Image: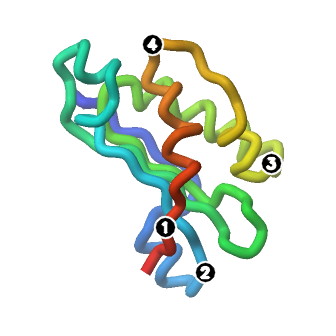
């Protein structure tokens, strides 16, 4: 699939159906420098966080590098880590993953 689609854990609809209080971090690919450099700005990154435990519930990525980027989230979920570990990490520039900490600084309530 081009652009790649990658998903792990729960998606937005599943979280709402289960009635989980959650927060959302999102970033359109058009705001990511690496995507602009490659001329591949179609897509969106979304990460869902449990509002009570700070653990990552899931992520859905559509866009350049999504198939590689998803592994960063999978590792944190398997470790049972707070999203703050990923938020406070330093990622290599220039990559799509360097925007994960930035997007996790601006969580919004999932409504």
Q: Is residue 92 above or below residue 28?
A: above
Q: Tell which of 8 and 111 is nearer to you.
A: 111
| Secondary element type, mark 1 | strand
Query: Label 2 belongs to which residue?
Result: 20
Q: Which residue is mark 4?
A: 94
Front label number (1 vs 3): 1
Q: Of marks 2 and 1, which one's residue comes earlier in the chain?
A: 2
Look at mark 3 in the image and give the residue it sits on: 81
Residue toward you, 87 or 60: 87
Callout 2 secondary element:
loop
Residue visible at 52% across and 40% down in the picture: 102
For the N terminus, the quadrant is top left
| Of callouts 1 and 4, the N-terminal one | 4
Secondary structure under the numbered disc 4 in the rendered image: loop
Crowdedness near tag 3: few (<14), some (14–19) or many (≥20) residues, C-alpha within 10 Å = some
Q: What is the quadrant of the C terminus in the image?
A: bottom left
Q: Nearer the viewer, mark 2 or mark 1?
A: 1
* Residue picked out by circle 1: 108
Gap between marks 3 and 2 measured at Cα: 18 Å
Residue 46 point in image, percent of width and height: 43, 51
Q: Nearer the viewer, residue 42 or 107?
A: 107
């Amino acid at each position: 699939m081009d652009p790649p689609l990658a998903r792990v854990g729960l998606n937005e609809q599943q979280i709402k159906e289960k009635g989980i209080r959650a927060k959302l971090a999102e970033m359109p690919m058009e705001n990511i420098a690496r995507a602009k450099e490659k001329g591949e700005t179609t897509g969106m990154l979304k990460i869902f966080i449990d509002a009570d435990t700070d653990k990552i519930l899931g992520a859905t990525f559509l866009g350049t590098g999504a198939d590689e980027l998803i592994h960063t989230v999978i590792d944190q979920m398997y470790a049972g880590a707070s999203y703050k570990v990923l938020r406070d990490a330093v990622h290599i520039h220039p990559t799509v993953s360097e925007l994960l900490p930035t997007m996790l600084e601006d969580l919004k309530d999932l409504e």
